[in-house]
Amino acid sequence: PVDNSTLNVPDLALPIGEYVFTLFIAKGVRNATTEVDVEIVAGAPPVISFTALTSAKYNTDQNFLVLKSSVSSPLSYSAVWSADSSDVSSVFAVKGSYASTVSNKLRVVLGLSLLTEGETYTLVLTATDSDSVSSYSTISVTMNEPPSGGSLDVSPTSGYALETSFSFTATYWNDEDLPFTYIFGTTDVNSDGSLDITTLNPFGDERFEATFSSVTLSAGLNSTNYTVGGYTEVIDSYGAVGEATTSLRVRTRSLTVLQLQNISETKATNALNSENHDLTKQILKATTRGMRSTRAAGQSNQGRMLLGAVTDAEALRASVLANLWATYAITPITVSDVASLLNVLVGVVDVPSEVIYDVASGSHFFLQTILRATLSADVGISTASTDDVGNALTYLFQTSWFNESSTESFVNAMNVSNVLSLASAAQLYGAYDGVGYDLNIGDVDMYSYRTAADTLLDDASVALSLGGSSDTATAAYFNANVSDLITASGESSLVSSDLLDLRINTLSTNIYGAALEGTYGSSASVASRLDQTGSALNGKTLMRSQLTDVELSLQDSADPMVIRSMPAGMFQVTLAATVAFNTSFNAFKRTFSCSVDGSVLDMNCPLTSETHTCDFAAHGDDGTYFFEYTCPYVEPTCLYWDETTLDFEGDDCTLVSGYSTDAVTCECTRTGIFILGANSTQPLHAFYTTDAPTQVPTPIPSPEPTHIPTPEPSAAPTPLPTAEPTHVPTPLPTYLPSNPPSGVPTYLPTSDPTAQPTMQPTMQPTYEPTPRPSTNPSIVPVPAPSHSPSVLPTLVPPTSFPTHMPSAIPTKSDTVAISVELICTASAASTQSDVTNIASAVESTVNIANAVVKNTQITSVSSRRLSDKQSQKHRRLATYTWTVLCDVEASLSEIGESSVSSFEATVGVNLNSGTTLSDAILASVSSVTSLDDISTSFTTRHAPSPSPTEATKSGGSGSSSASANIIIISMSCLGAILIGLFIYFRTRPKITDENEDVKFGDPENEIENGNQMESIEMGNRTTNVNLPTVTSLQANRADIISLDRLEITDEDSTQLHELRLSRNSRGSNESECSSPGINRNRELSAFDPAIHSYKPGVRIEQL
């Protein structure tokens, strides 16, 4: 043993073989041990080493971890990364997807969000040199488990907004990684009153105190009974988060706008004077919510009901914004604090009609300021914050701020691009190569992606849909080298390995439209902002796509590179057309002949009225001529926003051929803001003539037809039809029939039958049957039945009489079911489509013909939400545990199994074979991240007995059949009743006084109080129960015939044992007659004559 943290082993000190090195660390009574395996091989294989990990544990919501290695070898080598015995098949992030192996990369990205909490993963790097000598090395990554077992208490549980002081406390949380920190806040509430745990609004940053006191809450909506959701996040020392939520009721007082403003101003001023930034944010949020808390659900902005003029509301929003700026000045820049500030801002602008120009301008500037502050403070932003940026911009687009004079509106519109650049940089802060994030809310659809410069420029395409957008057309494409980008951008320090941030986004509102319309403030000007969506289509600035912005910037920079004059083919952008283009180009082409000089021909163009006047002198060499005409049609134009001219220009972009109705690709020499326009093409003409015909036809046809037909037909048809028919028919029939039919029939039958039948039958039968049967059946039946049944049933009614007697024993079904239970981890609650997809995955994995999956149910439980303390919480992902229950049902005879056990074994082997089931579920259910457990058990499925066999008998009537059925059913019921009475007198409980025994069966075989009753079966478990002395008896009735459940409770109520008794029910569904059957299961052993006396306190219930 070496008492040192470092052990150096000299070269050649160890012979060939495998070795285990163990490290033992102790501090006081605590200790830990770890091991590493080392194999010494012959020769000089490649030497592999790893960069040490920076943490002992990692969290799933940290999303990604970069693993770095180095390989040294005198020869050339190849390298492959893989995972050893992983419960997740694909763990490496590769350009927006995941892979199980990565080749020839010394640096890989591990997808932490796919891994299982509490598990340790071993990653293997294998290097093989050109002499086929290999070596490998491993590195282990341990996933952290979050705190658990706790809850959130809020006191009081109801109150009034801006009046009641609430207290939030996190209690009973457990985890080994101490100390804890806490975040408190509120959640959104769904329309049904349930809590939306995907949207969290924190009060402020993490704190070490488990209680957050003096909280001012916003009112809930009256449509949800004033429900407000509260939440806490409990964070361990490695950043894993356990979460708890609770519901409470917060009402609002009936106030005018001025009264609300006075209360808000007073409370906010007091909080600001005490520099309590958390309380100030709570007051401001409660104020903005108070302006809409009593709105009816479903109305636009839920229709404010507070009394007061619009000018009062405008003044209140201006007051809240001023106090928000003052709050920002005293608030630290953390992920949670930024989220709470942005959430208040959304409340300031969420009614655009009440937002005056100065408030809109100040709100937009607040967005820019706080996003720049996050980057300066080296923190990112949460998903909730990016959503609030999108919501705030969407509301601002509808204000007068984008409907002023042209210069002002254009500058404001260009500032929107700056805000999105800042938001993109904050999203990508600290992200690894190949990682992207989305912002898809309101009018904003954005995807931000980080990658190395050489990877991006090497024939790479980045689509908006990579972020989950429904827009599958919009994409940016690069094909160049780094030197081209340096020349176009002026970034002389750029090298191929540098990381670049790409932002691609669309806006569904044309924020340039109002100013381009030229009538600022008018309704037409406002409508122009919506032209591209197809909802107005009446402005001068009608566009054929949404505004599309593509920008490149250096890593973590909020200022995009100014890229101009790129080489041809270096950059293309595909835009999604919002108004479809007609790509049926042949529909616009026409071919005509001019045989009469001066005649006017109508071109019949779809879009314009076009004619042509025949002019022999101009086009036909003083004679007949032919011409092809292409009508005008609408084609797309590629436009970009020019910051110098403040207009859309087209000089730096060209249309790429092959566009479709809904996607157009433009090749441009610059990045920036793009949009599709449209233009009408000019009509095209092509004229041509032919020489006069010769007296004798030429051996081969002329390239073009003659104006006058030849006396005899040519050997081969002309490319175009002649203007007049020939005088002599052709020797072979034409492909199409003549317009009037010929006078005599042809000698040979036609290849296809006539449309109508002939008047007389043919002399011989046809070789093929007719497609439809004759209308009436044949009079005489055929001597033998057909080989296969008819498609439709016969019209003959069934026989009138049943068989004389039912069968002695009803038929039985050998159908059995194997119950399957799956435990999955998912990122969202289950949906009905998830039930269908998982059932299909199980059935395909079982892979047994005639076996079906039925009764599939999913129970999803949200276990916790995770946050990321180390990487500024880029993502907050909910974790759900799904319990999937289903039955694999089949008939043993149909599947060829000899017994239930063999069927169960086959199902179990198929489901647990490799990762087939896991792969099938992960492929079909996007929200499932892992399949954690599979179990099977046998459950009998008895098919109902079929109806009695019917037989034909001469004589009798329907009434006699019914009478026979009634007699049989009555006899069955009578027998069932007699059996039931027998069981009743043999097993009924004899209930005595409260302090006496409860007796079953024969009183001569009583068991005294306190005796032990052995082997009581409880579900799948068998236990021994010692009956205590108890003092009370509870029974629903004294004449219980059948006991379905027995519960045995100790005096101190610390132990509850439940015994469920199964019953068999006999009887016909048609007669609705049933009686208790004799239970043949050993579960009834508790009621054998030897066990029939219990002390009072045993509760007996008839279910």
Image (cartoon, rainbow, N blue to C red):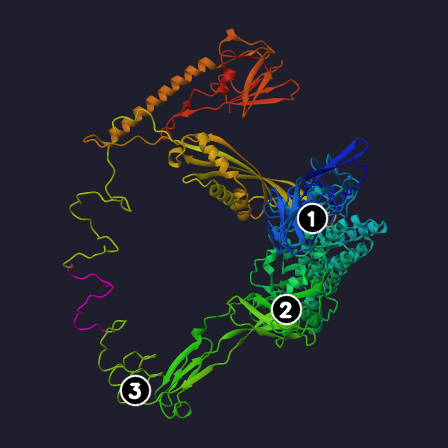
Local SS, label 1? helix
Local SS, label 3? loop
Q: Which residue is mark 3?
A: 708
Tag 2 and tag 3, C-beta contact below 8 Å: no
Q: Which residue is mark 2?
A: 480
- Label 1, label 3: how far apart the Cα atoms are: 83 Å
- Label 1, label 2: how far apart the Cα atoms are: 33 Å
Amino acid bearing label 1: Gln
Image x and y of residue 508, in percent: 61, 63
Q: Is residue 755 magenta?
A: yes
1 or 2: mark nearer the eye: 2
Q: Which residues are magenta?
A: 740-761
Taken as a whole, is the magenta stretch helix, strand or loop?
loop
Amino acid bearing label 2: Ala
Amino acid bearing label 3: Ile
User: Is residue 617 at least partly visible in the picture?
Assistant: yes
Q: Is residue 406 magenta?
A: no
What residue is at 68 percent from the left and 74 percent from the top? Answer: 646
Q: Which residue is mark 1?
A: 62
2 or 3: mark nearer the eye: 2
Q: Is residue 771 left or right of residue 630?
A: left
Residue nearer the viewer, 913 or 432: 913
- Label 2, label 3: how far apart the Cα atoms are: 59 Å
Local SS, label 2? loop
Q: Is residue 633 left or right of residue 975?
A: right
* Label 2 or label 3, whichever comes before in sequence order: 2
Q: Residues within 10 Å of mark 3 (few under 14, many from 20)?
A: few
Tag 1 and tag 3, C-beta contact below 8 Å: no
